[in-house]
Amino acid sequence: MCADMDLIFLEVKPSVRPHFWLSPQGDMIGTGERSKASAFLSSHSLKTHGSPERMKMKLFNTLTQSLETFTPLDDTVRIYVCGVTPYDTTHLGHAFTYVSFDTLMRYLEYSGYKVRYVQNVTDIDDDVLRKARELGVAWDELGRRETERFLRDMDSLNVRRPAVYARATDEIQNIIEVVQTLVARGYAYVSEGCVFYSVKRDTDFGAMARAIGLEDYQSMLTIANERGNFPDDPRKKDPLDFVLWQAQAPGEPAWPSPWGPGRPGWHIECSSMVMHYLGPQIDIHGGGADLAFPHHTCEIAQSEHYTGKAPFSRFWAHTGMVYQDGEKMSKSLGNLTLVSDLLKSYSPDAIRIVLQNHHYRHPWECFEEDLKVATDTAELFQQVRALVGNETSGQDSMLHNRFKVAMDDDLDTPEALRLLREAAEKAVKNHDLAVGAEVLRLTQVLGLFGKK
């Protein structure tokens, strides 16, 4: 089976689905909220076909720790999702994040919105340089190779490519402009060829950190140190200050800047790319739960003080961590289940179903039995496909409505899949072409059957 990993144990009744907030370690803690789906369904008021009605979707906003009605800034939903650092790609945790956001974008489009989606690749980073040295290859060659592997794996899982796949190394001049402005406004300072963001100069710093339970300076510093911060750097005024521009170290790549040769810090790369390709404010910013602090906390601070506009992102969406052998799946631990290995034994649809069988905010651990169950589900949907053939005009309004209720409830893909499995079993048993046709349409909303 596939184990969901709650930190607080809840009795979950059929009408209750857990909601979760992020702990400082990037895990989720259940708080519980009763679904209003039954009452909504009894009204049976949704339009069902033709151009889908724009939904009143609710998404969990990590920054406010609440479910909020999703309303975009305008007719184009602007989404940015933090991408991979290209080494040791692509593990199941990566796949969970990008399949989850691919599903969200497909559903937004199905609901009538235009979507502009940008994702980055952190192709210059301490970890990339370290891994390149270990392998004895050029850092940029490692980045190209691993990025190509990641994109192949995502293509195999029918994850659509973003409108822009932005590389940090293509963003240097824009990054320098942002850093210069932050220095001029007093939020950053130059020290021995580096530029640091001053957390004490920013009295609002840490909004995201506080939202996930890091209530004070020391708790922030502890987690930051676990995630790459160098508190004892003598060039820093404060141990929690973070680097915007890093002076060149011997043997490392560098770009010219007003402060001398160097390279950008991690956090500023994403801020610059968001603003470059999507503007000063966006609708949804996403990534794995472990990015909420420090990465997204720092993004908020530097972006809002550069643009003078808040909020930087109206919604912050974070995916739960995936575990292996009881530990969070990570490159540093080496406990990785690679997508390329899974594809040797399981179909892309089965792997997508495994991922969608878990709510995007919920941490979980995957076992072989879970993949077998997903394979059975994929084969069931194929039986429906064979049954329906070219007779795809049939409709099932109730199934359609229930699917929308599930997806509008914070993208509840586990419930959506449960509904589709039940309907598929009914269609096959009763040779019901109308139900079968509806099942096929809705599975395509989930990105199954290779429909780009």
Image (spheres, rainbow, N blue to C red):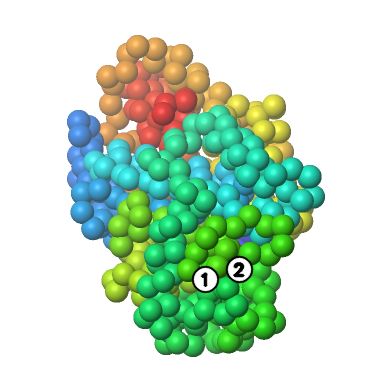
In the image: residue 135, left or right of residue 98: right
Q: Is residue 28 above or below residue 46?
A: below
Q: Is residue 390 above or below residue 88?
A: above
Q: Can residue 366 be seen by looking at this rendering?
A: no
- Determine which of the numbered discs, if any, sits on residue 371 in the image: none
Give SS at disc 2.
Answer: strand
Percent across and percent down for residue 381 are 49, 25
Percent across and percent down for residue 403 are 36, 41
- At 58% from the left and 87% from the top, the residue drawn is 237
Q: Which residue is mark 2?
A: 247
Q: Quadrant of residue 106?
A: top left
How far apart, in angstroms, are the residues tagged by discs 2 and 1?
8 Å
Identified by mark 2, the residue type is Ala
Q: Which callout, 2 or 1, points at the residue further toward the start of the chain? A: 2
- At 49% from the left and 81% from the top, the residue drawn is 189
Q: Quadrant of the C terminus?
A: top left
Percent across and percent down for residue 131 are 73, 51
In this rendered view, identify the residue nearer to me: 27 or 437.
27
Q: Quadrant of the N terminus?
A: top right
Q: Is label 2 in contact with label 1 (beta carbons under 8 Å)?
A: yes
Give SS at disc 1.
Answer: loop
In this rendered view, identify the residue nearer to me: 402 or 39.
402
- At 64% from the left and 73% from the top, the residue drawn is 229
Identified by mark 1, the residue type is Trp
In the image: residue 74, left or right of residue 365: left
- At 46% from the left and 14% from the top, the residue drawn is 386
Q: Is residue 175 above or below residue 76?
A: below
- Determine which of the numbered discs, if any, sits on residue 259 in the image: 1
In this rendered view, identify the residue nearer to me: 447 or 293.
293
In the image: residue 364, left or right of residue 404: right
Q: Can residue 55 be seen by looking at this rendering?
A: yes
Total labels: the figure holds 2
